[in-house]
Every structure is written in C-alpha cells, then in structure tokens.
Amino acid sequence: MSGGHFDYKQAYLGYIADQLERDIAYNAIPYDAAIVKDGEKYYGHQLQAQTIEFMDDVVGQLRRLENILREYDLAVSGDSCEATFQVRVGIAPSAA
C-alpha cells in the first residue's frame, strides 16, 4: 500500500505551492482592499516583479519535489520499483 513513508507530509509541499500561486495571482491588490472569493479573503503584497518571477520558479520546484517524493514513496512502499522511480523522475531513460 502506497503512502506513509513520509507520513503523507510531502503533500504539504503542494499546499505551499498553492498558497504561493494565490499570492502571485493577487499580488497587485492593495493590502487594504482584499478580494473575497469563495468565503476567503485574498490580500495583495505588492511584491516586485523579480520577486514574483523567482517565487513562480519556486512553485515549479515545489511541485516537482512533491512529485519526486511521491514517486519515491511508491518505490519504497512496493507499489512500483526503483527502476520505475528513476524513469519517472528523469534519472534513467524510458524503456519505450
């Protein structure tokens, strides 16, 4: 059975990436003029463009790391294997 090697905590990386994406999307909104959407308030932080670009890259890195850790979890849990892990994370060529 998969899951559990990291006590499912690798999924928290996705939560952080989601929050960063919201911060990026709502960045330009004045902090004192929050937008309410689906019962949530979203505030802007007015960060500079280079900060937003950098954090957008971080979002991609977090999503990649979450995926790598999920694939590792599958491999060590017996739902896949090390060879499959290597192919899926790009450290070994596909056998196709």
Image (spheres, rainbow, N blue to C red):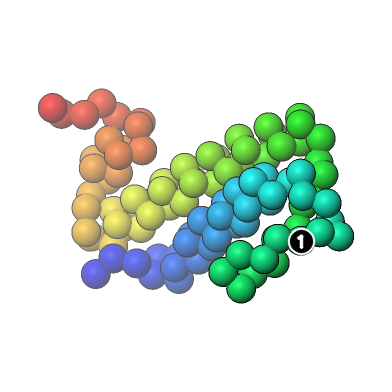
| Secondary element at tag 1 | loop
Percent position of residue 80, x then y: 22, 53
Q: Nearer the viewer, residue 13 or 24?
A: 24
Q: Does 91 sit above or below residue 70?
A: above
Asked which quadrant contains residue 38, the reply is bottom right
Please indicate, yes or no, whether residue 20 appears anywhere in the rendered image.
Answer: no
Q: Does 29 sit above or below residue 5?
A: above
The residue shown at (69%, 34%) is 54
The quarter in which the N terminus is drawn is bottom left
Which three-letter amino acid code belongs to the residue tagged 1? Ala
Please indicate, yes or no, whether residue 73 appears anywhere in the rendered image.
Answer: yes
Left or right of 4: which side holds 40? right
Q: Nearer the viewer, residue 27 or 10?
A: 27
Neighbourhood count class around disc 1 (C-alpha, 10 Å): few under 14, some 14–19, many 20 upward: some
The residue shown at (47%, 61%) is 11
Mark 1 lies on residue = 34
Q: Nearer the viewer, residue 58 or 18?
A: 18
Percent position of residue 57, x then y: 61, 35
Q: Nearer the viewer, residue 72 or 28?
A: 28
Asked which quadrant contains residue 94, the reply is top left
Looking at the image, how many numbered discs can be counted on the residues?
Answer: 1
Q: Residue furthest right?
A: 32
The quarter in which the C terminus is drawn is top left
